[in-house]
Image: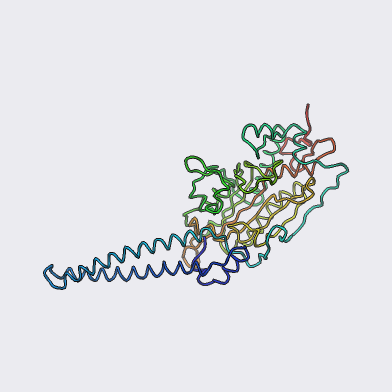
Amino acid sequence: MHDIKFIRENKKVFDKSMKDRGIHPCADEILFIDEIARESTKKLQDLQHKRNEIAKTMSSLTQTDLEYASLKEQGYEIKHKIHVLEQQKHEAIAKLEHFLLTLPNVLEEDVHYGEGESDNKMVRSVGQPKQFTFDVRSHYEIGEGLKLMDFQTAAKISGSRFVILKKDLVRLERALANFMIDIHTKEFDYDEIAPPALVLEETMLKAGQLPKFEEDSFKTTNGYRLIPTSEVPLVCMVSNEILAEHELPLRYVGYTQCFRSEAGSAGRDTRGMIRQHQFSKVELVSLVLPQNSKDELDRMTNAAETVLQRLELPYKTMLLCSQDIGFCAQKTYDIEVWLPYEKRYREISSCSNCGEFQARRMKARYKSVMDGKNHFIHTLNGSGLAVGRTIVAILENYQNEDGSVNIPTKLQPYMQNQTTICNYK
């Protein structure tokens, strides 16, 4: 949600940010609606004051006084004008609120202009892709060859974009989630939370998922939404709260199933586990003081990168350009892991600073020690990591010529010191 005061005082900055995002500059249109709402409010106050004065004067008169009838008529006219103005004010405010809810966050100054993924800038590259002496297989070829990954049965049960994992791959999924959560809780001080997978539509709106991503989420028949990411319930844990300054930062990590309709992705990543309707993810959420959010983004990104470093998976960290950045974010780093079969890096984590954008929607504030006033907190979120895509990366980067897969050294204790995933016949 945008601060209308910011738009009034920084019209050019707001318009530039929208333009860089590929949206037509609209500050003048917003301020025109805002002016209608403000002018209606002022006129209402004047009329209400005048109505009170008339009522006061009438109370000192009798109904037979000549002035009484005239004042009574004026009172009726003012009542009608107030009704019209209240309707006008309500319509203007509703239109302004809807307008602001549909516009993405204002970008940070160091976010560069770009029109898509190809314009993102590499911040760092860690690790070198392994050179294989045999033809590498895709993760789904490996998984199906091991008889541990079943897309056909999943499609029979649920349709396309689902998978059934079996035996060692199920254990690998659980091991990865525990491995990631241990890193984030023990080394980066995140508190583990098990949030609901069903949320209210109001919660989706507060987190910035609605109305923008209406078609991307699944809705139940009684109005709940399946979470597209645990960011939604985690960030909204502080909605409508006024926190004490000393309570911040709050850092949450949650491991959940996530659900996305993948609207608009027809024909993309139709094979394998890259893009599914249901997937598991370890999510990081930070709630911080405004002056600390930029440093917190670097800290969160480091936490996500640490997982890949421990798994010894090559990756790149990218600063997203203006038109590739998410709706709620003002700055985002994507972490992309190397996939040998595709011979390219694919996103495995996205870490974003949302500033006060979500906090305004959900009225999440803190009381400042300095001035005693309530101010909006800043929120951040990041994948730490997408578990399914981490499985993909391990299968492809640690594959052997015989179809088996080595387990990363740091992960082996989480799998009872198992070193290899084989096809046990």
- Where residue 143 appears, as percent x and y from the top left, is 75, 36
- Where residue 16 appears, as percent x and y from the top left, is 60, 69
- Where residue 165 appears, as percent x and y from the top left, is 69, 35
In which quarter of the view is residue 150 placed? top right
Q: Please report the residue visible at 51 percent of the width from the left and 45 percent of the height from the top.
A: 199
Position above or below: 313 against 103? above
Residue projecting furthest to the front:
267
How many numbered badges does the structure rendering display? Answer: 0
Q: Please report the residue visible at 47 percent of the width from the left and 60 percent of the height from the top.
A: 97
Q: Please report the residue visible at 70 percent of the width from the left and 57 percent of the height from the top.
A: 117
Q: On the rendered image, what quadrant is the C terminus found in? A: top right
Q: Nearer the viewer, residue 166 or 93?
A: 93
In which quarter of the view is residue 318 placed? bottom right
Q: Is residue 358 left or right of residue 67?
A: right
Residue projecting furthest to the left:
64
Q: Is residue 268 left or right of residue 228?
A: right
Position above or below: 305 against 25? above
* Colour scheme: rainbow
- Where residue 228 appears, as percent x and y from the top left, is 58, 46
